[in-house]
Amino acid sequence: MQESAYFKEYHPISGVWDEMYGDAGIRAHYTKVIEYLSRESSDDLTRKEELAKRLFMSQGITFTVYSSGEGIEKIFPFDIIPRIITADEWSFVEKGIKQRLRALNLFLKDIYDNQFIVKDGIVPIDIIYSCPHFLREMYKLQVPYNIYVHIAGIDLIRDHDGTFYVLEDNLRTPSGVSYMLENREITKRLFPDLLPQCGVRSVMEYPSILYKNLLSLSPRQISNPNIVLLSPGIYNSAYFEHTTLARLMGVELVEGRDLVVKDQKVYMKTTVGLQQVDVIYRRVDDEYLDPLVFNPSSILGVAGIMGAYRKGNVAIVNAIGNGVADDKAIYIYVPEMIKYYLGEEPLLKNVPTYQLGNEDERQYVFANINKMVVKKTNESGGYGMLMGHAASEEETEKYKKEILKAPRNFIAQPTISLSAAPCYIQGALHPRRIDLRPYALCGPDGIEIVPGGLTRVALKEGSLVVNSSQGGGSKDTWVLA
Amino acid sequence: MLSRVASSLYWLSRYVERSDGILRMLKINYASSQDTVQEFTWEPIIRIFAGHDEETAKLGNDSRAVIRYMVTGKSNPNSILNIITFARENARGVQEHITKDLWQCLNEYYHTVKDNRLENALKKDDPIGVLDVLIKQVMLYYGTVEITMERGEGRSFMNIGTYLERGIQSVDILDAKFVSIDDNPDLLRDTTYWKHLLLSLGGYEIYLKTYRTGFEAENVLEQVVLNNDFPRSVIYSVNHIQRYFERLKSDSNLDSSRELSFLIGRLQSHIRYSSVKTIEDEGLHTFLTQIRTQLFGIGDALNIHYFANS
């Protein structure tokens, strides 16, 4: 096939799986896109890039950064070249995530009930009780259909040979799904006709599947239950996502101050009086949900909501206390959970992980710290990490001291060299590191995963950190039929 | 409709209407300050819209300084910059309840005020030109509301906010102007004085058509309080509050709506069954203070019964 100017200059990073470029040249599933792109000049692509920026800005798809008392609105960087996943790859990922979620759901049910997995010695008890997200308030609390994880975002990465690994399970309030939806809308505008030509599967079903699941959870058997999306409000960085999802599902967007609990039922304050709320899709963290039970200074939550939940008068999505299952120290045990609860071999692999509370493992990690990524177990968003290969000696020593204060709160993983995909940067294609977060929805009918997800990309050359707070961007993610 | 949503729509409208009132007042008063014939003072404007403190005392009678304080002053809670920021924040929280056009229109207004070029123009260019740019933004806003907004509960709350704010402003402006006469009785026969008052309320042309005898204080009073056809008269505002409130009535909030109906009806009758003569007998300042208190009372009652802020 003919290779145009962009690709003569494309140099895959050695020792890294390149999504587009294999040993035999451009991979088959990228050829149609490359043919399309090679008909465009780099001026055309730059214009498309500007169009994308304009579309994001004018639609207010922005997040606000506060500095010196003034809000500055920024867009989440978007790379116009799609990331493509083949049908085979997807079917494997889909099966793997479903398997993992089935096990994690059973784990939550078990850990907040009989704790068989602890009694059978699979997961040590101290790991559970030392986890700040394990909530005694959830003990023996009945949730509808025993579903705890209604919405999950599982972060996947690919090693040098293309093998998928699970980097993290996000089972609390995973965000970013609005970017999966909006990125696709932008791509439709940027590359007319390309999506149907390539046979890309649609992601549009996401809001309706979520709505269907929320509806099924209503404790009142009425034809039109009240479903609301609880947001921390306009100053939250994900507020755009909250309005988008509320609009797409046609549910009311509420804040904590709009709700009130009376007789262990949750009501919203409307201009015609109180109206009972049946299902709450909350985007407020556990800790802030009920000032009577958790953080007493929280004004984002609703006083008494935990009582209504315990009574079964309101359904809360995701369930409270899920953090015990996506804690980075518990993550180590997920493959064991799959074997224990399902009697199956795990399809998706874990990244090898060392628990620093463990003397031997800690010594090994300290000796090889240059090849390690050390993370705090209860932090996310790329905060509080040590990238061993990039850190100075001084930083490393300082971090080691911090680890020794509370080793349980740290894990270490060998530096995994995330796969790379082509990005359009300054007029040419360059490989940049990516991950993948598909969104899985669990309802009474089972687990459904919309074919797609959020591909995050580390736009800085050589960077391995894809988080938006650390200079990451995103790509439209195509799953081929 | 959520109480918070209703409240945000109501405040959004109040803020935009307030910005309109301030901008028009600034424009006409600036023009008036350029007429060297009469003694001009910014004092009433500062009293109504900003209040007296150390900072406003420093402004003195420097027109540019006053206008900059009123338009882009960060420390002035009633500056156009701050008002529009509040309006936009209210709108942001209810984006699913206003049209996209309206949201974009408010965004543009906000960005126009925040733009450094505006601040620079206020320093050296013709202030009237700058104020006109902003007044046009408000007119765009009202046009967009008129053309795109659904005629539902939300729009009724928006209109109630607009007319409540407008009524309060007309009362305040009138009161300030007549209070100044107490200090300086010559103003009573100063036609430019009344002309500027009418211009700042946009009532100059309608006055000329209604009264053929020149500018007299009593006629001005009649027009600004009692003229049903003058869109900035007090009675016009109250009639519209009543009209949009009627549309909110429903079976599920009888007690609340009865209380509001009572307050609005009482105020409406009070004004409707007044004449220039009874107002003068009662004392203008007393009359205006009463009307003002009652308008505020309606705002408080909405807060308690509809916005769940009790």
Image (cartoon, helix red, strand yellow):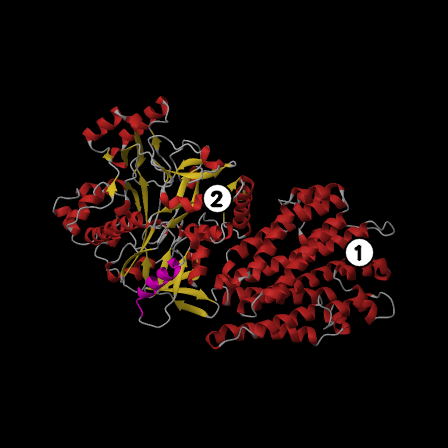
Work out whether A117 lies above or below B240: above
Q: Quadrant of residue A159?
A: top left
Q: Is residue A214 magenta?
A: yes
> Mark 1 sits on what residue?
B183
Quadrant showing the C terminus of chain A: bottom left
Q: x, y percentage for residue B71?
A: 67, 48
- Main SS of the magenta part reads helix
B112 or A160, which lies in front?
Answer: A160
Q: x, y percentage for residue B307?
A: 50, 64
Side of B15 where A436 appears, left or right: left
A338 or B270, which lies in front?
Answer: A338
Q: Chain of mark 1?
A: B
> Mark 2 sits on what residue?
A37
B148 or B112, which lies in front?
Answer: B148
Quadrant showing the N terminus of chain A: top left
Q: Is residue A53 magenta?
A: no
Query: Nearer the observer, disc 2 or disc 1?
Result: 2
Local crowd size for mark 2, using a 10 Å CA cut-off: few (<14), some (14–19), many (≥20): some
The reply to whether residue B13 is visible in this rendering is yes
Side of B53 where A336 appears, left or right: left
Q: Is the residue under label 1 in contact with that under label 2 (CB below 8 Å)?
A: no
A234 or A262, which lies in front?
Answer: A234
* Residue shown at 25% from the left, 33% from the top: A407
Amino acid type at circle 1 is Asp
The mark found on residue A250 in the picture is: none
Callout 2: SS: helix
The reply to whether residue A297 is visible in this rendering is no
Work out how far the residue at label 2 is from the one at label 1, CA to CA, in angstroms.
78 Å
Q: Which residues are magenta?
A: A205-220
